[in-house]
Image: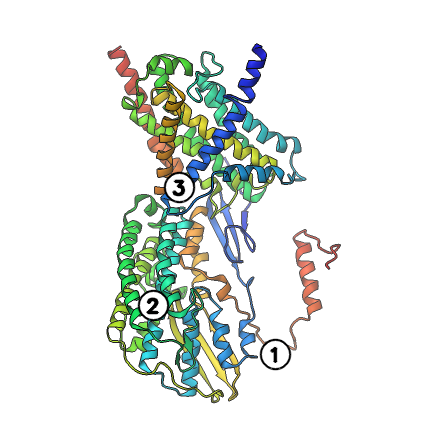
Amino acid sequence: MDILKQIITLIIFPGGLFLFVLGLVYTWINRKLIARLQNRVGPRWFQPLADIAKLLTKEEIVPGEGNAVLFIGLPIVALAGVLTAALYVPIAGLPPAFSFPGDLIAALYLLGLLTLCTGLAGTNPPGRYSLVGVTRTLTQFFSYEAPFLLALIGPAIVTESWQIGEIVASTGGRWLVLTQPVTFIIALVALMGKLEMPPFDAPEAETEIVAGALTEYSGRGLALFYLGRNVELVVGLALIAALYLGGFANPLAFFAKTLALLVLIAFTEVLVTRLRIDQTVGLWWRYGTLLAVIQLVVIVIGRSFFP
Amino acid sequence: MQPQKTEQFTVPIGPQHPALKEPSSFLISVDGEVVTNAIVRLGYAHRGIEKATESRTYVQNLYLLERICGICSHIHGTAFAMGVERLAGVEVPPRAQAIRLIIAELERIHSHMLWLGVGAHQGGFDALFMFSWRDRETVMDLLESISGNRVNYSANVLGGVKFDLTAAHIGDILKALDYLEERTHHYLKVVTTDASFLQRTRGIGTMTRHQAEVLGAIGPTARASGVLRDVRIEAPYGAYVDHPVTTITDDRGDLEARFAVRIKELFESYRLIREVLDDLPPGDIKTRVKRKIPEGEAAFRVEAPRGELFYFIKSDGTDIPSRVKVRTPTICNMTSVVKLAVGHQLADVPMILAGIDPCFSCNDRMVRVNRNNGSDGWTWEQLRQHGIEYYKQRSQDYDPLVVG
């Protein structure tokens, strides 16, 4: 019975299938919002699903050069990483499916796996177009990953726990965004960078290098990468909402809070011009990381003086 | 530590590439993200239009030449028609000239709005792209209601224009101009104040006044570098003689200046259309032009939305021209792109390219130089053999391929 329950947790709810559906729905909401804000009609509700279904039915061309096992394996690892990370995050208002002390750090690294796999995929085999994309993907990865980590460590320090479930429980519904607004914004913007959304879409800018690191991918591999990105959107939003917006009392709160964050993201995507890669790096290291560190120092000092 | 000698990494963009809307080839050498060299190869959309004019009558050619460019079709027709009228010695009625001016300025509005969207899209500011193209529909609808077509309006006939402007048309135009003017003020504010957009345009692709003169830049691209080069002022034609244009120039020469100049030119177009509509001369809209054009040569210059457009027409006394030569503005500005791209980031190249408002299909011409050395060009078979050798050198062997 216990095994059956675990299998359901992994494959159907809240992991696996449920996350796929949620990822596609959230992606659609994002695309539709952007379209409406830009005075366009936007896609119909099944468009993200249709995109994935189309890619899955297409032939996957494995390049002759390069490692075929790696080529096929990387998208699977990327998706698996994101799905595993989801298990430690409270999805749909339920407590995390699995939990251990320090799972916050594990989840953050698992979320980074998608970008790392994208980077590796672009160098196997090394093509001209994908190499330019890889350079940008990894440069961007190294610029937002540190502030993203720092931003999510803030709540952990306040609640003195490295376990996502415990952090959420001990905030007891308090909105940490009120006390740590800077790191909240940094976390949200870094999530956009992770997902290569505009204005951080230089690694796959369609007017410059088009597909970026995933140039060689066509069928199933591309679909899995896209799916991974869709799921990461949900997991990232859930993580930020759980840590900063006072956790989720019920499924309704989950949807309300994550969707509110999605609207914020959509507005930013529409309003800001794409940043060049040097501007992205400058933004994160000059302002993002610095502000996050200052915020952390303030928290640490504040806690030692007013425990 | 010895400085490492890096191998040159070249990113080929084109001839076929999803980022290009028209075929052309750019070989961009980069060192990391910085462009070290750029080579442009044109000629992938050569359509043989100049040759085709030599087997069509003047009237037929009018419609053929309009199709050189989908965006500035009217100005091509105007340049050709005015050249032929000069050869035929025909005086075009003032009302026809005024209508030609109005259509040309409406076309300029439509072209600049289109460019604003493309420029914003290249920089990754899609909201501005979508909104400027939405407002461009206003002027497209206007042109459709006047001429019946959204592009290729066919307003010109030899000796005048095809249709008259009714009172209803004039009312529509004035109403649309008010709306567009309000929107244009907003766009000018956006491109000159939006911090994130300025990051991508200010100080990027700066062309000094000297460079613009040396590289032979024309049109709004040259005017953004402070070079006053506008055929409407240098050699006024048609109704521009009576309705002078004030040229907008900018001394900064960067992408921001090109955005500002083009948007400010929109205000000038609005003013000019209102001025001409205010005292639209009465009378006929066309005169008769004989089918056979007297022998002679005529060169005619007009100001297309992208810059100077040049037409050379040679007549041998029949109803078919013996030579028509067209030079579109893009070819003059193309050298500046290659020059300006060096030293910038790869991400800036699409914006620098879009900054000149390129139209690849318009500019592709073929010139054969006769050097009197007995060479008689290549036969089809020789050309085919050369192609096979060329691709073999690039390690692509198409020899075993059987076509058909």
Q: Residues within 10 Å of mark 3 (few under 14, many from 20)?
A: many
Indicate the position of residue A196 as horizontal and vertical percent values. Answer: 45, 36
User: What residue would you read off at disc 3?
Assistant: A34
Apparent side of residue B350 relative to residue A51 in the rendered image (left or right)? left
For the residues beneath circles 2 and 3, the answer to whether they share a chain is no
- Please determine whether, in this image, residue A307 is positioned above or below residue B65: above
- Please determine whether, in this image, residue B62 is positioned above or below residue B120: below
For the residues beneath circles 1 and 3, the answer to whether they share a chain is no
Tell me where residue A173 sits by quadrant.
Answer: top left
Tag 2: amino acid = Glu
Apparent side of residue B327 relative to residue B265 in the rendered image (left or right)? right
Q: State the separation of the CA atoms marked 2 and 3.
A: 33 Å
Residue located at (48% from left, 66% from top): B362
- Please determine whether, in this image, residue B25 is positioned above or below residue B34: below
Residue located at (32% from left, 47% from top): B198
Indicate the position of residue B346 as horizontal and vertical percent values. Answer: 46, 47
* Labelled disc at residue A25: none
Q: State the separation of the CA atoms marked 1 and 2.
A: 46 Å
User: What residue would you read off at disc 1?
Assistant: B372
Give the secondary structure at mark 2: helix
Query: Which of label 2 and label 3 is nearer to you?
Result: 3
User: What residue would you read off at disc 2?
Assistant: B105
Query: Which of label 1 and label 2 is nearer to you?
Result: 2
Tag 1: amino acid = Asn
Indicate the chain on which mark 3 is placed.
A
Q: State the separation of the CA atoms marked 1 and 3.
A: 62 Å
Residue located at (41% from left, 73% from top): B155
Tell me where residue A59 sits by quadrant.
Answer: top right
